[in-house]
Amino acid sequence: MSGHRIFSMKFSKVYPLYVQKAERKQRTKGEVDRVICWLTGYDLAELERHIELETDIESFFEQAPAFNPKSALITGVVCGVRVEAVEDPLMQKIRYLDKLVDELAKGKAMESILRE
């Protein structure tokens, strides 16, 4: 594995943080799952399997069956960095997911989050 330390983190450690962030703002785990599945192409069973297997983040994104082509429409700032300007492809995918969960927690409509 190369680069950032987050690449080797287990997705199962980050996932509950996404759910907690959403739930604090009266959104649901199901909505977080929908956003993750939309972005990665995983179905719910595959998502749960990766969580149970404690897949690292790098493998989670590399094994994504169909990364959504509409992800290029995700723009904005996460942790002070513009997601569309992130040069490392893996880090950009991670930031895309961070941004989608942020939008969910901020109360945006699901249609808007999923770029419909």
Image (tube, rainbow, N blue to C red):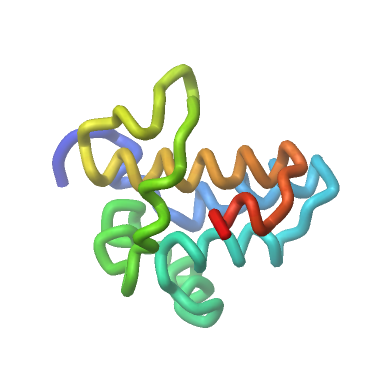
Image location (x, y in percent) of residue 93: 35, 47
Horizontal arrangement in the rendering, residue 35 relative to residue 60 (left or right): right
Image location (x, y in percent) of residue 31: 69, 61
Q: Total of numbered circles in the picture?
A: 0
Front residue of this view, candidates 103 and 23: 103
Q: Quadrant of the C terminus?
A: bottom right
Front residue of this view, candidates 29 and 73: 73
Q: Residue at x 34, y 63 (%)?
A: 67
Q: Residue at x 43, y 70 (%)?
A: 50
Q: Residue at x 61, y 47 (%)?
A: 18
Q: Residue furthest bottom?
A: 45
Image location (x, y in percent) of residue 6: 34, 39
Q: Residue furthest top?
A: 80
Image location (x, y in percent) of residue 83: 39, 32
Horizontal arrangement in the rendering, residue 44 relative to residue 28 (left or right): left
Residue 103: name its quadrant. Answer: top right
Q: Residue at x 49, y 66 (%)?
A: 51
Judge whether 67 appears above or below 4 on screen.
below
Judge whether 53 appears above or below 103 on screen.
below
Judge whether 6 appears above or below 76 on screen.
below
